[in-house]
Image (spheres, helix red, strand yellow):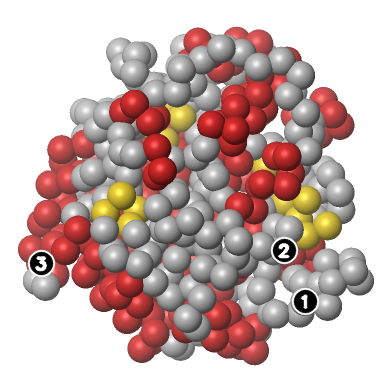
Amino acid sequence: MNESELVESAKKVLDGNWTGEFTIPSEALYPHQWSWDAAMIAIGNSYFDTDRSMKELEHLFAGQWKNGMIPHIVFNVKEKTYFPSPEYYDITRSPNAPEHVKTSGMTQPPVHAMACFLIHHNSNDKAKTEEFLKRVYPNLLKFHRYLMTERDPEKSGLVTIFHPWESGRDDSPIWDDALARVKITKMPKFQRLDIKAEGEKSERPSDDEYNRFIFLVDLMKEYNYDGKIMYEKYPFKIKDVLFSSILYSANWALLQIAKLIGEDSKEISEWISRTETNFRKFFSAPSNGKSNNSDGLFYDYDVIIGERIMKRTISCLLPIYTGLLSKQEAEVIVKWISGADFVAEYDTIASVDEKESDYKPLDYWRGPVWINTSWSIRYGLLRYGYTERAERIKQGALRLVAEHGFREYFNPSSGEGLGGKNFSWTAAAVIDMIMNKSNPIDLFLKQ
């Protein structure tokens, strides 16, 4: 396996998916711009094309809502092959929606501040990228403020998601029980285009899951995307470990950006402190005295019923990425990462513990290996000094791609590539794992 050849192949993937304004995740299934994909793609491009990286994010930020939300999709209005379409989302119901850009009505994990920081860090023209940071800082600050207020009225420092799609892990078994409690009162007619466009049905969320996904979108529309009303009435509200972990790290990146460009950072420091205070209270097992399960992992919290969701998935491991864990807490997670239940082909990490009853090796976020989570866990391991295990995950991820292509995700047993082909964030993560000689988390956490 030649790393320089892998980098060149990854660059070709990103070049092939570049539209001139933004990068699509892959052909056929994903013809628009996705939010956390765009941030990862910008990181990958930052090593070779600073201008494209900046343009990628500024195109996304042009779709930002007035309340600060960065939507999870900015639509290419020329493309008509994706459902739900911009017409279906009908964001004109909300006074916060942008008037001249078509977007979805929900958000995604906030990787963007980290991407912006790394664009500057990797740039050879610091003056140019410092001006970029000054331009986008208001967008980043407003987005983080939205997440820390409208999506966290409890002031816990932890984000509440309203839809599985907001988590980025659409059909994870984490959501099953919460979705099962959602009573579908009226089901609109629609045609699933995700199965038609790409892959086998066994690799995508089930029809029952998808029906509930669409019904939740309909509820958002019914409430005119009003966050306050939704927080009172909406039947799906989850404090998400992965989302909150990313926001914590992103707040550190935003803090560094604020210092670099001379902005006041007091508000950001307060957000960081709030998360540190409450992270374990919400996410650490056991949940409420009913469970004796103290396995050292971290679990999503169901706001509706006031309990943790005790399912072992990749989310349980991701807090190692934040740097907020003690050495002892990190060591426990490393034991899980090194154990047989999570370890997949080539020493990579499956998206679900194979002993979970919901484990399905071909089904999206119910078992397959994703390169972006391998990327995150690797950096967490480096943060705590587990260099050998981090290197094994990196080499395993690179081997998956070298042997099976830049796929969306991979069979944890055989390594077979699944989902979208020539997938952009897979290419971007490969570039960063090979090219980056420093740990971003260490950069963010510098005092």
Q: Which residue is mark 1?
A: 293
What amino acid type should be assigned to the residue bearing mark 2? Met
Name which quarter of the figure residue 145 lies in: top right
Which labelled disc corresponds to residue 310? 2
Q: Name the residue at 24% across, 32% down.
A: 27
* Callout 2–callout 1 Cβ contact below 8 Å: yes
Q: Which residue is mark 3?
A: 4
Coordinates of residue 4 in the picture (x, y in percent): 10, 67
Coordinates of residue 23 in the picture (x, y in percent): 28, 36
* For residue 375, side relative to residue 326 (left or right): left
Question: CA gap, disc 2 to disc 1?
Answer: 9 Å
Say what secondary structure mark 1 lies in: loop
Name which quarter of the figure residue 424 lies in: top left
Query: Looking at the image, can residue 317 be seen?
Result: yes
Q: Name the residue at 31% across, 38% down.
A: 199
What amino acid type should be assigned to the residue bearing mark 1? Asn
* For residue 424, side relative to residue 405 (left or right): right
Say what secondary structure mark 3 lies in: helix
Q: Earlier in the sequence, mark 3 or mark 1?
A: 3
Say what secondary structure mark 2 lies in: loop
What amino acid type should be assigned to the residue bearing mark 3? Ser
Q: Nearer the viewer, mark 3 or mark 1?
A: 1
Question: CA gap, disc 3 to disc 1?
Answer: 45 Å
Who is closer to the viewer here, 38 or 207?
A: 207
Coordinates of residue 418 in the picture (x, y in percent): 31, 49
Question: CA gap, disc 2 to disc 3?
Answer: 42 Å
Few, some or many residues within 10 Å of mark 1 (<14, 14–19, 20+): few
Coordinates of residue 291 in the picture (x, y in percent): 84, 72
* For residue 438, side relative to residue 333 (left or right): left
Q: Name the residue at 24% across, 65% down.
A: 400
Q: Quadrant of the C terminus?
A: bottom right
